[in-house]
Image (cartoon, rainbow, N blue to C red):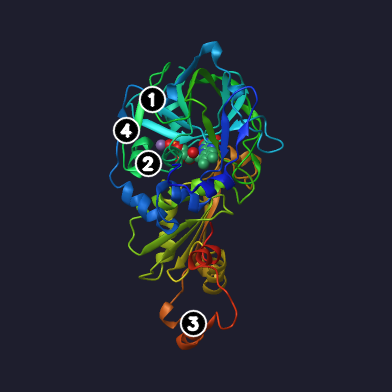
Amino acid sequence: MAESVPAQDLRSFLQMARRRDHDIRLAVDLLASRRRYALALGIETDQLAAEWNRRTKNLIPPVIVENGLCQQHVWVGDQVDLTKLPMPTWNERDGGPYLTLGCHISKDPETQARNAGVYRNMVHDRNTLGILVEPYGHLRYQWSKRPNEPFPVAIVLGGDPVVPMAAVAPVPYGRDELAVAGALRGKAVELVPCVTIPLEVPACAEIVIEGEILLDDLRDEGPFGEFTGYYGGHRAPRPVIRVKAMTHRDRPIVHAVYEGTPPSGSAIIVAVPREAELLRQISLPGVKRAHMTRGGGGALHAVLSVDKPYEGFGKYVGLAVLGTTAGRGIKQVIVVDADIDPGDPIQVEWAVATRVQPHRDIEILSELPGIILDPSLPRGEQKPLLTSKMIIDATRYDAKDFAPVCLPSPDAMAKVERDWSRYGIVLPDARAFESRFKRET
Ligand SMILES: Cc1cc2nc3c(=O)[nH]c(=O)nc-3n(C[C@H](O)[C@H](O)[C@H](O)COP(=O)(O)O)c2cc1C
Ligand SMILES: [Mn+2]
């Protein structure tokens, strides 16, 4: 990673926190812009979704090796002290310090299918972490199969960013996120066996926490300032992870992301794989681009651009989005024509303002599964998690007869383009211009 990211970029964004009594450092928001996300994959920003889908067409399963840097130092039992991790209390009223980018690796107790997912962890004490898993999380699905036994889980912090990228991706159950990570890197992820539990973890991890989830050992967890911009998952008794070992490489760097009021870094990590997966999972011809907005925390609002072949297609695409694994948590889908850039909020609003008749083009669907952290749900409803959702078909109705878009003549446009410098106006270079005015970064 260090090689593919210019030093300048890293210097300006890496927050290094160093505590006096030990040598663990903290790097926050390494993937908090589309540009940095693309740099970590060695591609251009506008290739993210296409390249994600090209690379993950054929998964590359991980391989097991004997030794890994992640086990240069091994602390077991009483030697473990999680309070040594330089973890901030991110938002004022958080229940305590939180790990925000821990990739939880686990296995299906029946099929042995591996899963990786990012879940928040409150640091309770030296060897206990809290966890909150929404009802649809694959980790919960796995642990529900053995509710009366300690459930092994390994939390991976840092290392190759393809691991958290894949762990957040909304892939169908049974698809090994570490095989997705290998495909993203074009090389199998090397795994080493854990020291105290029957799981394997990426050898390149900076830090690994090995533990067991105890479903009958509940401790108050939360509140935590969430990606929605509100405290979510109110303080309540939730399962704990009893930590059996912590391993790390020399002078490790813990990775984390700030979650909070948009725009925050977590929205990009959530958005990018979701956009790619939406395009992969919707099998309708004519769907061009998908964009998860930053105001929607990367999770709640989708905009899709389409070449519309027939009337009704916009709503059809909206329903398809909500029917995918990737779209389960999406609350609002806006479908626009292909002349609109779904990543440009002004163009999208223009389409909604000028191509939508609400009585005809907006559908509200009720009683669908939502996101546990959505603060607009009345408290009582956060439990059954039933939300309403909206599809806005902002494509032109009866496009043949639609009012033409107005622009000055091509001759006038070309003349102005040629003569900017004669007018004394210096334009930023094309790439900066494009990224500033054309898309969110
Ligand atoms: C920074 C960050 C924190 C997250 N925290 C949680 C969480 O605490 N609980 C949760 O259910 N999902 C959380 N998610 C979303 C899950 O990682 C995501 O739904 C993932 O696909 C779950 O994987 P799985 O279903 O394969 O286990 C978080 C995502 C990010 C990017
Ligand atoms: Mn999964």
Q: Which label sits in the foreground, 3 or 4?
A: 3
Q: How crowded is mark 1: few (under 14 residues within 10 Å), some or many (20 or more)?
A: some
Q: Which label sits in the foreground, 4 or 2?
A: 4
Question: Outermost residue, top direction?
Answer: 78
Distance from label 1 to label 3 (Cα)? 58 Å
**Mark 2 and mark 1 in contact (Cβ < 8 Å)?**
no
Q: Residue 439 carries which label?
A: none
Residue ID for mark 4: 62
Residue depicted at x 47% and y 83%: 414
Q: Which of the two labelled residues, at mark 2 and mark 3, occupies the earlier sequence position?
A: 2
Q: Which of the two labelled residues, at mark 1 and mark 4, occupies the earlier sequence position?
A: 4
Depth check, front residue: 193 or 143:
193
Q: Residues within 10 Å of mark 4 (few under 14, many from 20)?
A: many
Residue 189 in which image quadrant = top left
Depth check, front residue: 17 or 158:
17
Amino acid type indicated by mark 1: Gly
Distance from label 1 to label 2 (Cα)? 29 Å
Q: Which mark is residue 68?
A: 1
Residue depicted at x 56% and y 43%: 29
Q: Which of the two labelled residues, at mark 1 and mark 3, occupies the earlier sequence position?
A: 1
Image position of 287 with respect to 165: above or below: below
Q: Does the residue labelled 2 lie within 8 Å of ligand 2?
A: yes
